[in-house]
């Protein structure tokens, strides 16, 4: 389910608030969550989504929808180092634009 689509006027405020609220309720070391929060702070948010584990009623994946590039993502201090190493390959296949960034909270992966 996608939450907080509030158009260009709202600049994704509801979506950002949703991600920030869910971020504070997450377990784990926080590296993946911190990366997603950096994405939220740095790039305009169009929408957000969350996948939940219905047994524990906890979020397991968080998603940010916006428009930015792989180069912009890799420039974030919290960005996974593997992304920087893949930039040339991604560019060779014309994979430069990013519309959705997600993190798996259980695995701590991006």
Image: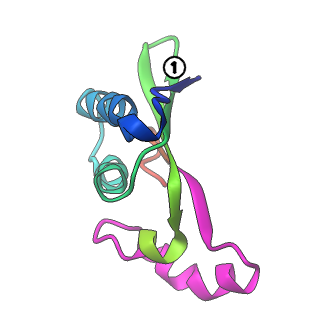
Q: Judge left or right: residue 56 versus residue 97.
A: left
Q: Position of residue 44 (x, y in %)?
A: 39, 51
Q: Position of residue 77 (x, y in %)?
A: 28, 71
Q: Judge left or right: residue 52 versus residue 24.
A: right
**Where is 13 relative to 86, above or below?**
above
Q: Judge left or right: residue 90 versus residue 67.
A: right
Q: State which quadrant residue 1 falls in.
A: top right
Residue at 43% across, 13% down:
57
Q: Position of residue 61 (x, y in %)?
A: 49, 36
Q: Position of residue 81 (x, y in %)?
A: 42, 76
- The residue where tag 1 is placed is 53
Q: Nearer the viewer, residue 87 or 59?
A: 87
**Where is 5 relative to 76, above or below?**
above
Q: Judge left or right: residue 4 versus residue 91.
A: left
Residue at 28% across, 47% down:
30
Q: What is the magenta range?
A: 74-101
Residue at 48% across, 78% down:
71
Q: Check disc 1 and report its element: helix, strand or loop.
A: strand
Q: Residue furthest right?
A: 93
- Mark 1 Cα-neighbour bin, 10 Å: few <14, some 14–19, many ≥20: few
**Where is 57 relative to 52, above or below?**
above
**Where is 62 relative to 34, above or below?**
above
Q: Residue furthest front?
A: 9
Q: Does 79 appear in magenta?
A: yes
């Amino acid at each position: 389910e996608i939450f907080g689509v509030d158009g260009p006027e709202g600049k994704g405020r509801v979506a950002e608030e949703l991600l920030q609220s869910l971020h504070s309720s997450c377990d784990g070391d926080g590296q993946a969550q911190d990366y997603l929060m950096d994405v939220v702070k740095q790039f305009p948010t169009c929408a957000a989504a969350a996948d939940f584990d219905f047994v524990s009623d906890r979020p397991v994946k968080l998603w940010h929808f916006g428009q930015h590039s792989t180069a912009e993502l890799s420039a974030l201090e919290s960005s996974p180092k593997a992304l920087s190493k893949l930039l040339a390959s991604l560019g060779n296949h014309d994979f430069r634009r990013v519309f959705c960034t997600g993190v798996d909270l259980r695995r701590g992966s991006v």
